[in-house]
Image: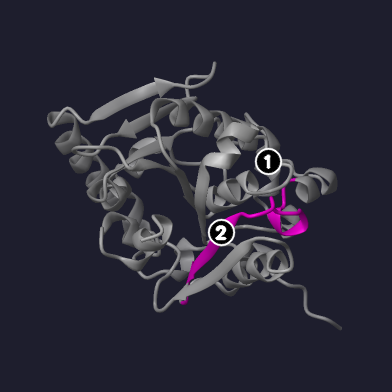
Amino acid sequence: MTKKFDWDAAYSNGAYIPGGNDFPPRWKSLAAEFRAEIAAAGRLRADISYGPHERNTLDLFMPRGEVQGLVVFVHGGYWMSFDKSTWSHLAKGPLAHGFAVAIPSYVLCPQARISEITVQIATAITHAAAEVPGPVHLTGHSAGGHLVARMACFTSPLGQPIRHRIRKTVAISTLGDLRPLMKTRMNETFHLDAVEARLESPSLLEPQEGVDITAWVGGAERPEFIRQSTLLANIWSGFECDVNAVVEPEKHHFNVIDGLADADHALTRTLLCL
């Protein structure tokens, strides 16, 4: 008899990371310290509204001197936890290169379906792009990696003017195929069905022609996240777009994003096409 696969374990991250519970408070502390520093310098525009819900807000961090473009970072948390205030420090790397950085919050599951969150993120990107000239670079982690990959799909809710401004997308620890998540206990919150799972899975959709996307994942992540990242890169390589896959050695799901806070890290340089 075939042993039943444990999908909950496959998508559980903290339980398999030493000191996993220590990461969220550490992120909050680093973010608060950085926000205070940038606010004191007059370079933070906080809580910009982009929609009708109280969570439809974004923070916009501005660099010193001339703006080179816009980076949008979309946070993870399985579409059901966290907000923009936990990730402010990840703006540090792009800011050092002259890029403004927008970090949005969004309405979480179960108040919103994943398909509705996709539309929220498109609205947030459009709003932020109206505030900052130049090219747009998108990145997101985990569920956020899924959301920025969705922006690169042929069925993206982004309008054509914004699509034409997007120079690079980096989907970190992305979830490209949502169908396995229907088998987890988390689906009691997602309420994913087969139709929505297919329509919201970038790996099952066609990318926009000419998209430049990197699927970035940690080498010490859960095997399912490595599979998901590899899957997206593999399938999209068959289309007319520029696709790369990076497995960063020794990084797990909670520290694979750290490179965004470092101006010289390969993750930041890849995102900014440096």
The answer to whether residue 165 is left or right of residue 191 is left
Name the residue nearer the viewer: 272 or 148: 272
Task: Count the marks.
Answer: 2
Q: Residue farthest to the top?
A: 52
User: Residue at the location (48% across, 50% down)?
Assistant: 140
Which image quadrant: the C terminus? bottom left
Whether tag 2 and tag 1 are in contact, CB under 8 A, the answer is no
Mark 1 — residue?
A: 156
Res 11 quadrant in image: bottom right
Type of amino acid under label 1: Ser
Q: Provide the residue span drawn in magenta.
A: 200-219
User: Residue at the location (52% across, 62% down)?
Assistant: 173
Mark 2 — residue?
A: 213
Residue 201 location (% of width, % of height) = 72, 52
The answer to whether residue 178 is left or right of residue 215 is right
Type of amino acid under label 2: Ile
- Secondary element at tag 1: loop
